[in-house]
Amino acid sequence: MAHALKIWPLLTGTIRYEKTLSTRNRGHGEFIDAPILAYLIETSNGRILYDVGCDYRKLADPALRARYFDPMRPVVESPRMQEGQRIPRYLAQLGLKPSDIDLVFIGHLHFDHAGGLCDLPGCEVHVQADELTAARTGVDASVFADELVNADRWRIKIGEYLVAPGVHAISSPGHTAGHMSIFIELPKRGPVILCGDAADLEENLTHEIAPGCCWQDNDALALASIRKLKDLALTDGAELWPNHDMAFFRNLPAFPAWRD
């Protein structure tokens, strides 16, 4: 059986928001601090990034920060991100450059998952066709139009596929139209499923609660994706990694440590 080799969780920033954005119809008035994560995956066939965090420039420049993030208040505060949390800074600590990344797999096109593509020029980018089509409508306020300007250069994918040896793209729509999770077979600790925003919190998985924000308000589709990921994890003995759960994140290997 083919395996990936390692996963590095990368904390690319944090964001504070009303919990109901993660748990549909639950958590009104309760604010949580959530990690903004990317993952570096090493395989026998090259290196993959799953998501890339925010565009640092929009946070470092006060005018840009106000333009892009003030409209989200008070439900969502501006993300907090340090220069050292940019993807190239993490790569440099491992002796790597952006050109050493063979593929960037974007789970969905919200600003906290795709904004950092500006720091990775020339990298091959994979995005689902349904995701890009929906993003281009301009209906989803969490998609920034300027972060789609290079989309004509991306590899547009349809459905599930083998990304690399031991790495499988898993369709998990609902939060967005073409949301994708990723299944990673590891040699020592067994498989891991990076849920992406199909499951922000462990609560989404344990209690089968849809995300607060669902494409076209289709919470049934989001719940079906949660159940699909849970069934896959049960069948294959995989760990499910929620994407914005601070308590869960703190139990993951702290960079530069990894999971293998």
Image (cartoon, rainbow, N blue to C red):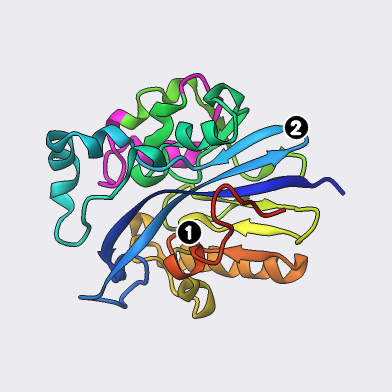
Picture layout, residue 98 above or below residue 209: above
| Residue 225 among magenta residues | no
Q: Is residue 126 magenta?
A: yes
Q: How many marks?
A: 2
Q: In the rendering, at what x and y percent does residue 193 appear?
A: 63, 58
Say if 43 sits above or below 224 in the image.
Answer: above
Q: Residue at x 53, y 73 (%)?
A: 205
Q: Position of residue 177 (x, y in %)?
A: 44, 49
| Residue 243: assigned label | 1
The reply to whether dot 1 and dot 2 touch (C-beta < 8 Å) is no
Q: Is tag 1's residue or tag 2's residue first in the polypeptide sequence?
A: 2
Residue at which label 2 appears: 45
Q: Nearer the viewer, residue 55 or 83?
A: 83
Q: Is residue 100 above or below residue 219?
A: above
Q: Residue at x 40, y 65 (%)?
A: 211
The quarter of the picture where residue 159 lies is top right
The magenta segment is 121-146
- Looking at the image, residue 256 sits to the left or right of residue 142; the answer is right
Disc 1 residue type (three-letter): Asn
